[in-house]
Image: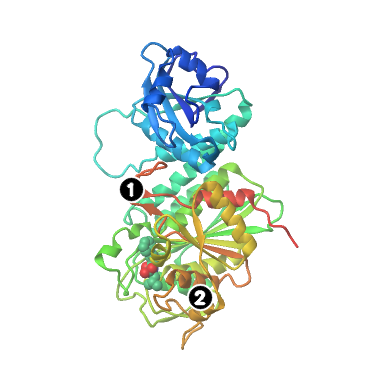
């Protein structure tokens, strides 16, 4: 898709050229000066009149009308130079990409130089563009009957640069790898529950494993029973669909040490069980495997980039249904770790499946654990729909997750986690733990419950109930699944090292 070219982007014939505009000069300067000359200074007039704006994320399409070899220019507003960030640049590129996708053209070119600023080098601009382009133009095909109109899609992007071609090409490919991994996660989340059962999720994971030569282990119900994953099995008890415990291992070091465990909640549909959800709250619960999707999206990126790291991905997958066999409030179950759990709410099922997955990740040698889950409505009440809630037992690991999230542009906010919180999840008269100590601070309770299964292992919990989906279109994609945390997890792995004491 990406082609790197030298020279002046304004000279040769092209369908469309993307040009960045920094909010500052009244006049076109630098590389844009010759362009303004081609138009006899009219571009400067259009900037003055506001038809072309350099305001962040503003997009203007100007036609060459025979004056230039370029048929159309897409001017991308970048805002004030000092305020341009990596994330902001991706948003501007996303807005431009959406415009391009609506233009029914096949080839675009980009004047990379025009996107360089104080904090952004050419390689970063290339990465930002390709990631944003792939994400912004994502569409979930859906199940409508097809129209006969031929689809016209952009299939080549020519990057004009005077920089190092290999480095720019690599950056563009890395960016599109991150974009594609995110889109893979989005598609899994967008699939309805009848099209993505636990067995289907297991099949996607198997195919991913084969594609990237991961070691794949997929436990079936019998094996899960044999191992004694009582918490996971309880959630599956009311379903006619068998559960699967998915394990993917990527070994990038000589030894199986310093293993990062990525654990994702894979509930393909959450009815709430006997603590049934109200009719409005149940719609959308096909997305309750957003954590699993984030982990698989990250593994897709990791499989392509092949960093020198070790990763084990663990995904418990089932739906949470009701039947004569289903588990019930008041039931007491025994987890793989041996800890017993009093079930007070069958709708707090995510923490139950994750409990066994955390323990199983440790069996596979995980030295660090990050769990990702659409775990609680409480995190939405606390932080809104645009922030992922976090909990941790380890400052250093949390710092690394936070750094990765900054780089990915995915907002994380840490919630407090105290001894009192631990006491509340340990407060049961009949068992070691209870799965629902009440509504007060229940996003914290969800995380705190999972933390009991980290035991001494450094761990970060990410609650994506608010961020896994979005109600409206945005610069980097359509309404629906966001693929949130696929990029953060992949960046965490790529950049990971902890200073040893
Ligand atoms: N899957 C839900 C959480 C959720 C809510 C995800 C909204 C996405 C959007 C989870 O299993 C759940 O039902 N949590 C309960 C926990 C409670 C019973 C302690 C909740 O948040 O209400
Ligand atoms: Zn639930
Ligand atoms: Zn759930």
| x then y, percent, for residue 69 | 43, 13
- Counting every numbered tag in the picture gives 2
Q: Residues within 10 Å of mark 1 (few under 14, many from 20)?
A: few
Q: Is residue 468 or residue 95 the one in the foreground?
A: 95
Mark 2 and mark 1 in contact? Answer it, CB < 8 Å.
Answer: no
Q: Residues within 10 Å of mark 2 (few under 14, many from 20)?
A: many
**Mark 1 falls on what kind of element?**
loop
Q: Mark 2 vs mark 1: which is more N-terminal?
A: 2
| x then y, percent, for residue 479 | 34, 47
285 on left or right of 263: left
| x then y, percent, for residue 160 | 54, 23
Q: Is residue 339 or residue 414 the one in the foreground?
A: 414
Q: Which quarter of the rendering shows the C terminus?
A: bottom right
In this figure, which colouring scheme has been used for the structure?
A: rainbow
Residue that label 1 marks: 472
At 43% from the left and 37% from the top, the residue drawn is 94
| x then y, percent, for residue 62 | 37, 22
Q: Which circle, 2 or 1, is nearer the viewer?
A: 1
Answer whether residue 229 is visible to the viewer in this image. yes
Give me the disc on residue 335. Answer: 2
Q: Is residue 480 above or below residue 60?
A: below
Q: Is residue 196 above or below residue 58?
A: below
Ligand 1 within 8 Å of disc 1? The answer is: no
- Where, by quadrant of the figure, is residue 198 drawn? bottom left
40 on left or right of 303: left
125 on left or right of 95: right
**Mark 2 falls on what kind of element?**
loop
């Amino acid at each position: 898709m990406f082609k790197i070219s030298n020279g002046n982007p304004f000279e040769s014939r092209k369908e469309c050229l993307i040009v960045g505009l920094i909010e500052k000069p009244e006049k076109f300067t630098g590389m844009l000066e010759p362009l303004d000359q081609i138009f006899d200074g009219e571009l400067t007039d259009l900037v003055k009149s506001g038809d072309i704006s350099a305001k962040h994320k503003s997009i203007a399409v100007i036609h060459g009308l025979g004056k230039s070899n370029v048929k159309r220019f897409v001017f991308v507003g970048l805002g004030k130079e000092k305020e341009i960030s990596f994330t902001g640049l991706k948003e501007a590129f996303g807005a431009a990409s959406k415009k391009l996708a609506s233009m029914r053209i096949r080839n675009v070119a980009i004047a990379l130089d025009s996107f360089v600023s104080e904090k952004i080098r050419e390689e970063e601009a290339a990465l930002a563009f390709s990631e944003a382009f792939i994400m912004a133009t994502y569409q979930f095909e859906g199940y409508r009957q097809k129209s006969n109109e031929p689809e016209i899609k952009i299939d080549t992007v020519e990057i004009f640069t005077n920089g190092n071609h290999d480095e720019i090409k690599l950056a563009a490919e890395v960016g599109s790898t991150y974009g594609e991994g995110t889109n893979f996660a989005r598609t899994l989340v967008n699939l309805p529950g009848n099209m993505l059962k636990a067995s289907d999720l297991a099949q996607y994971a198997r195919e991913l494993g084969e594609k990237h030569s991961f070691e794949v282990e997929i436990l079936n119900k019998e094996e899960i029973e044999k191992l004694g994953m009582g918490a996971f099995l309880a959630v599956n008890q009311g379903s006619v669909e068998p559960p699967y415990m998915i394990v993917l291992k990527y070994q990038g070091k000589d030894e199986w040490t310093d293993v990062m465990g990525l654990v994702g909640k894979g509930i393909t549909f959450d009815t709430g069980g006997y603590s049934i959800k109200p009719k409005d709250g149940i719609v959308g619960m096909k997305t309750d495997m957003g954590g699993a999707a984030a982990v698989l999206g990250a593994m897709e990126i990791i499989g392509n980039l092949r960093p020198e790291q070790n990763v084990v991905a663990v995904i418990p997958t089932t739906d949470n249904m009701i039947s004569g066999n289903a588990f019930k409030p008041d039931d007491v179950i025994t987890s793989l770790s041996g800890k017993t759990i009093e079930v007070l709410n069958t709708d707090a099922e995510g923490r139950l499946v994750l409990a066994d997955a955390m323990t199983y990740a440790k069996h596979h040698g995980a030295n660090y654990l990050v769990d990702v889950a659409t775990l609680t409505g409480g995190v939405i009440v606390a932080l809104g729909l645009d922030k992922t809630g976090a909990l941790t037992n380890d400052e250093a690991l949390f710092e690394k997750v936070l750094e990765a999230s900054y780089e990915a542009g995915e907002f994380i906010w840490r919630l407090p986690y105290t001894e009192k919180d631990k006491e509340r999840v340990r407060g049961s008269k009949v068992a070691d733990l209870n799965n629902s100590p009440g509504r007060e601070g229940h996003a914290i309770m969800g995380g705190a419950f999972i933390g009991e299964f980290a035991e001494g292992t450094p761990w970060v919990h990410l609650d994506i109930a608010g961020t896994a989906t979005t109600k409206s279109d945005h610069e980097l994609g359509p309404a629906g699944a966001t693929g949130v945390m696929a990029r953060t997890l992949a960046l965490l792995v790529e950049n990971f090292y902890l200073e040893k004491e």
